[in-house]
């Protein structure tokens, strides 16, 4: 059972903001890597096509 | 073969990172006691300081790989590999550095009501390092890729790692004649439970860096291979 | 011994070029005096001696930046840097020769700037002069290396302030502390900075100019 914090609400917000920033960063990073992966897969698909056309 | 082993390693590191981050968060909010002096906002420290320390590790790792660039004078493949690894490490160091500045600023606001304090050595040091390593990217982007760029980036990364202690010393010295500091930095005395929580958080951050490092490196390497392939096919 | 002869020859080349062209040094002199004048107008009345010292050091750093920016431009414009690198001398001799030349320009500018500061603001003491001399060593050794790096890219001289200013922060701290008479440790700190970074710059210059 969690004990409610005795600190005033504004302190809670600051702590949440600090951790939230880190969380958002990690999510953003994952999104960027995901986008990169999509681009790489597309490029790979194009190259496979080209190789097939070559024979 | 090497790629599969690297993939397994990355997955293992990532899993460990997730586990540690989860444990750290649990410990921070449910186990560690509320600090007597600073109240609830002291909990920001459990992330802020590990992120700062991880940033130092990033720059040190980048400098180590930079040394590898300078030493591998005869082997262009090793130069390229070390250069890429050094670049990714410095890049992540800047990212963690920015996070240090942001979380530090939030903590300063929570503790003293100001968004910045020149009295916080760590924050000021990170400002200087942030400026320095941002210039690293400007340098890299202004030179064409090649041996010279790898060398210059390596030399600059080495300068950076030497700058860290020199800057810290300078900042300590500067406090004598800059406006007197009313608020001092957080107390080093920690209860055992606090120390344990801190250590878990530190390990979590380091593993987060390791995960991001491997994933980013893998992505860049695949990019390079694809480019090679495209050149071969066209 | 031929290493020192190479260094002397290279430094002399830069000094002679400047004597003929008369571009860098006059602009540095004019800049530093103009900067000091602006600072006088920028400071509110009754500002302390310490604040004025801060502005002196700012003026010196930016004047040095001006000199450093000009330092490698002749080489790059005439493609001389490649020729120098091919010359049968130790590459670091290029760095040392250039650093000595820049030091000479900076010292010449300061011979004018320091008395001007004493006249415009307040008098300066021996430890300020010592601090300026030590700071010059650091500025010239580090700045010359960074100048060579900046010139290799396409952003050229625009890059140098970005590269140089973070590294100049410890110099300013040491310099202002020593000028403000806050103790001998600031001069010692400048000596430490000079030793560490000069060594690093001397060892890494040849990698910076390597082409292939």
Image (cartoon, helix red, strand yellow):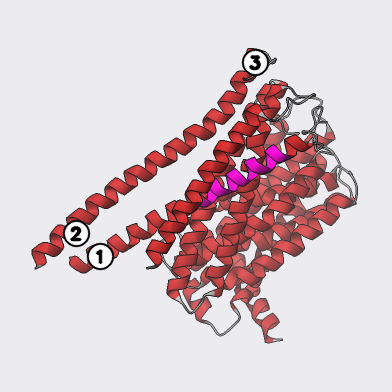
Specify the principal SS of the magenta part: helix
Foreground residue among C31 and B122: B122
Compared to residue B180, the image places residue B131 above or below, namely: below
Callout 3: SS: loop
Q: Which residue is mark 1?
A: B229
Foreground residue among B193 and C159: B193
Membership of B202 in magenta stretch: yes
In the displayed structure image, the side of residue A3 where residue B75 appears, left or right:
left
Foreground residue among B182 and C134: B182
For marks 2 and 3, the one nearer the N-term is 3
Q: Are there few (<14), some (14-19), or many (20+) residues within 10 Å of tag 2? A: some
Where is residue B220 drawn, in percent x and y? 39, 56
Q: Which residue is mark 3?
A: A4
Over which residues does the magenta segment extend? B196-210
Where is residue B216 drawn, in percent x and y? 43, 52
The answer to which image quadrant residue B195 occupies is top right
Chain name for mark 3: A
Q: Which residue is mark 2?
A: A47
Chain name for mark 1: B
Label 2, label 1: how far apart the Cα atoms are: 8 Å
Callout 1: SS: helix
Where is residue B81 drawn, in percent x and y? 45, 66
In the displayed structure image, the side of residue A7 where residue B25 appears, left or right:
left
Compared to residue A21, the image places residue C81 above or below, namely: below
Check chain identity for marks 1 and 3: say if they share one.
no
Foreground residue among C13 and B50: B50
Label 2, label 3: how far apart the Cα atoms are: 58 Å
Check chain identity for marks 2 and 3: say if they share one.
yes
Q: Residue at x 40, y 67 (%)?
A: B2
Badge 2 vs badge 3, beta-carbon distance below 8 Å: no
């Amino acid at each position: 059972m969690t004990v409610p914090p005795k600190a005033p609400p504004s302190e809670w917000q600051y702590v949440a903001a600090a951790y939230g920033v880190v969380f958002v960063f990690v999510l953003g990073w994952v999104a960027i890597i995901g986008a990169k992966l999509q681009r790489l897969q597309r490029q790979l698909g194009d190259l496979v096509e080209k190789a097939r056309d070559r024979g | 073969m090497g790629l599969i082993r690297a993939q397994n390693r990355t997955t293992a590191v990532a899993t460990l990172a997730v586990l540690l981050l989860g444990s750290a968060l649990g410990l921070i909010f449910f186990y560690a006691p509320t600090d007597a002096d600073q109240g609830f906002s002291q909990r920001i420290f459990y992330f802020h300081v590990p992120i700062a320390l991880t940033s130092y590790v990033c720059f040190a790792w980048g400098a180590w790989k930079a040394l590898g660039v300078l030493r591998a004078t005869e082997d262009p493949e090793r130069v390229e590999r070390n250069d890429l690894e050094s670049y990714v490490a410095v890049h992540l160091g800047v990212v963690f550095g920015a996070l240090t500045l942001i979380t530090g600023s939030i903590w300063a606001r929570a503790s003293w009501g100001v968004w910045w304090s020149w009295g916080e050595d760590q924050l000021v040091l990170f400002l200087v390092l942030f400026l320095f390593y941002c210039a690293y990217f400007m340098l890299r982007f202004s030179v064409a890729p090649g041996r010279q760029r790898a060398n210059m980036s390596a030399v600059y990364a080495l300068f950076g790692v030497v700058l860290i202690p020199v800057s810290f010393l300078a900042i300590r010295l500067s406090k004598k004649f800059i406006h007197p500091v009313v608020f001092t930095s957080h107390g080093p005395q920690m209860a055992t439970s606090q120390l344990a929580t801190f250590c878990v958080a530190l390990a979590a951050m380091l593993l987060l860096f390791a995960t991001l490092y491997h994933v980013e490196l893998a992505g860049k390497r695949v990019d390079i291979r694809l480019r090679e392939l495209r050149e071969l096919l066209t | 011994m031929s290493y020192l002869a190479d260094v002397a020859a290279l430094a002399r080349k830069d000094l002679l070029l400047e004597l003929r062209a008369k571009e860098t040094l006059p602009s540095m002199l004019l800049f530093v005096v103009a900067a000091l004048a602006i600072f006088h107008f920028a400071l509110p009345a009754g500002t302390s001696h310490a604040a004025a010292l801060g502005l002196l050091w700012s003026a010196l750093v930016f004047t040095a930046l001006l000199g450093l920016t000009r330092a490698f431009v002749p080489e790059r414009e005439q493609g001389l840097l490649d020729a120098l690198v091919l010359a049968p001398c130790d590459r670091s001799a290029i760095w040392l020769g250039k650093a000595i030349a820049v030091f000479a320009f900076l010292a010449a500018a300061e011979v004018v700037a320091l008395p001007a500061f004493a006249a415009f603001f307040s008098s300066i003491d021996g430890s300020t002069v010592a601090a300026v001399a030590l700071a010059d060593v650091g500025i010239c050794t580090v700045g010359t290396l960074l100048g060579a790096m900046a010139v290799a890219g396409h952003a050229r001289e625009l890059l140098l302030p970005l590269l140089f200013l973070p590294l100049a922060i410890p110099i300013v701290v040491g310099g202002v502390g020593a000028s403000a008479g806050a103790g001998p440790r600031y001069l010692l700190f400048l000596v430490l900075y000079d030793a560490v970074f000069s060594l690093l710059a001397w060892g890494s210059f040849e990698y910076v100019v390597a082409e292939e």
